[in-house]
Amino acid sequence: MTLLIGTDEAGYGPNLGPLVVAASAWRLSATDAAADSLARMAAEIGAAAGSRQPPWADSKQLYKPGSGLGAIERGVLAALASAAMTASAQRSSHGIPSDGATLSSRLGIDVPVATAPAEWPRFMAMSIPVAATPETLAALAGSVATILPRHGVQLVAVACRLLHPAAFNALLDSGLNKSDILSKTTLELAADLRGLAPGEPAVVWCDRHGGRKSYAALVGRHFAAPLVRTLVETPATSVYEIPAAEARIEFTVGGEARVPVALASMTAKYLRELAMAAFNAHWTALEPGLRPTAGYPLDARRWRAEAAAALARSGLPPESLWRRA
């Protein structure tokens, strides 16, 4: 068996809300043509659940602002149900999370009190699901549970890391730049998941991190590897071999076309949207009439001006709210 890990992020550009990095880990018998075989499997799962869409695809195809979170939520929660069954010996809760606290636990999210934002209690209390119906979720989760074993595939884990503004700004102050922070968080998460199957070879698929082309030094640092072999470095793809970890890692433009990366992309987007819903609910309760924001730079500045009175009353330091570029 081979462990196949896909990673992606959401919220890299905004000033408000968290940067979310997610990963999905799968076990399958062979990685030759894995991208195509997993895509066919996903299409089969969608059809069996009565949908024309596969459950896992590029989050930008499944979600448009104002269209609702239903499609992304179904895919993420059905995947978590499958991963819970795969890891039944290690997990105490199964099935579909019912609130933000359970969702955070199942995704391995740990937000220290010192860097937790003011809206975090509201996020933890949020009821799940927020958009998908129990019937469609049950149908999709049932299809996943039936079809993955038929293809000899196990979905081992789905995991996330959230960097709220205080934690993100602290990393900036330590000397890292924005791209470094994304790569550090992604590779540390991938290295953690690689440890789920230490006796098996592993392949890690990542979307490219901005305009970065060379990752060898970062891979070596975060996988604690004395040797990293550069196999390919082109404008579209960078590939490295990590002999000590029995792993290969690829950074590819358009990586969301691969199912493991797509599920990571969806999970990151889902968590980011829930986090911003909690953010807007918290601040609107303090300043009635305050228009919500998605946190991107232009609208974030508008929001900060309109929320000035509530921010002043809160007494929160700016670095706990505003993510610097």
Image: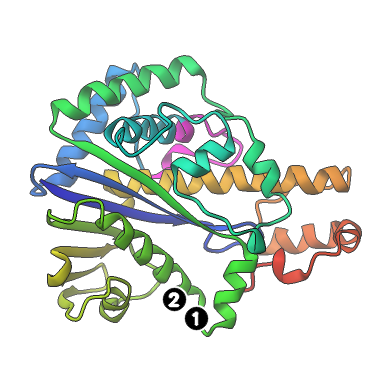
Residue 59 in the image: state x and y as whole percent: 43, 44
Quadrant location of the C terminus in the rendered image: bottom right
Quadrant location of the N terminus in the rendered image: top left
Badge 1: how crowded within 10 Å, few (<14), some, or many (20+)? some
Q: Is residue 174 magenta?
A: no
Residue 164 in the image: state x and y as whole percent: 60, 61
**For the point 31% across and 32% down, which residue is it?**
88
Residue picked out by circle 1: 176
Determine whether 277 is above or below 248 in the image: above
Residue 182 seen in this snapshot: yes
Quarter of the image for residue 192 reads bottom left
Determine whether 15 is above or below 233 in the image: above
Q: Are marks 1 and 2 in contact (CB under 8 Å)?
A: yes
Out of 244 and 294, give the one closest to the viewer.
244
Quarter of the image for residue 163 reads bottom right
The residue range painted magenta reads 58-73
Amino acid on which the number 2 mark rests in the picture? Asp
**For the point 49% across and 51% down, which residue is it?**
109
Amino acid on which the number 1 mark rests in the picture? Leu
Residue 210 seen in this snapshot: no
Q: Secondary structure at mark 2?
A: helix
Residue picked out by circle 2: 180
Out of 42 and 197, give the one closest to the viewer.
197
Q: Is residue 72 magenta?
A: yes
